[in-house]
Image (cartoon, helix red, strand yellow):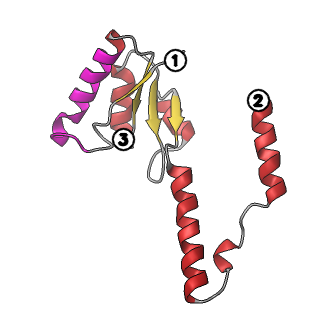
Amino acid sequence: MFINARTDMYLASIGDPAARLTETLDRAARYLDAGADGIFVPGVIDPETITTLAAGISAPPNIMAGPGAPSVAELSRLGVARVSLGSGIAEAVYALVARAATELETTGTYQSLAGTADYARINTLLAEARER
């Protein structure tokens, strides 16, 4: 079992922004002392802050990526061991659903569905993922 402790200092904008880094590092140390194996810090995308977190946490750091965040390769270079998308993929799907429903209701057309993945491709991707 791998316990990945989470601190939402950045995601929830908790406390004084100037104190978030120190508080996050303090919480990470307490979680590790309590037995956590890794630390998840969603909501931080600034490369300098990520580098400081990776250097200051003595366990694999996990960052939640999304628009505005560094690429996976860059996060790796900054010291991140695990990248999560959180609910980002589901939120992107919900946005498509909202656009399609609005289009259907307002114009009666379906253009927002153009370019979506076909069913066979989705099944192939899922089968390949199971094999890994």
| Amino acid identity at mark 2 | Arg
| Amino acid identity at mark 3 | Val
Answer with the quarter of the image where residue 15 lies: top left
Q: Nearer the viewer, mark 1 or mark 2?
A: 1
Q: Compared to 57, does 117 lie above or below?
A: below
- The question of residue 30 being in magenta is answered with yes
Residue under label 1: 2
- Crowding near pointer 1: few (<14 within 10 Å), some, many (20+)? few
SS under mark 3: loop
> Considering the image in quadrants, where does the C terminus appear?
top right
Q: Between residues 64 and 91, which one lies in front from this camera angle?
A: 91
Q: Nearer the viewer, mark 3 or mark 2?
A: 2
> Considering the image in quadrants, where does the N terminus appear?
top right
Residue under label 3: 44
First to last magenta residue range: 13-31
Q: Nearer the viewer, mark 1 or mark 3?
A: 1
Q: CA distance from mark 1 to mark 3?
A: 22 Å
| CB contact under 8 Å: marks 1 and 2 | no
Q: Is residue 19 left or right of residue 122?
A: left
Residue projecting furthest to the bottom:
107
Q: Is residue 68 left or right of residue 25?
A: right
Badge 1 or badge 2: first in the primary sequence? 1
Q: How many marks?
A: 3
Q: Is residue 120 left or right of residue 108?
A: right
Badge 1 or badge 3: first in the primary sequence? 1
Residue under label 2: 132
Q: Residue at x 81, y 40 (%)?
A: 127
Q: Residue at x 45, y 15 (%)?
A: 37
Q: Compared to 21, does 16 lie above or below?
A: below
Counting from the top left corner in percent of width and height, residue 58 is at 39, 15
| Amino acid identity at mark 1 | Phe
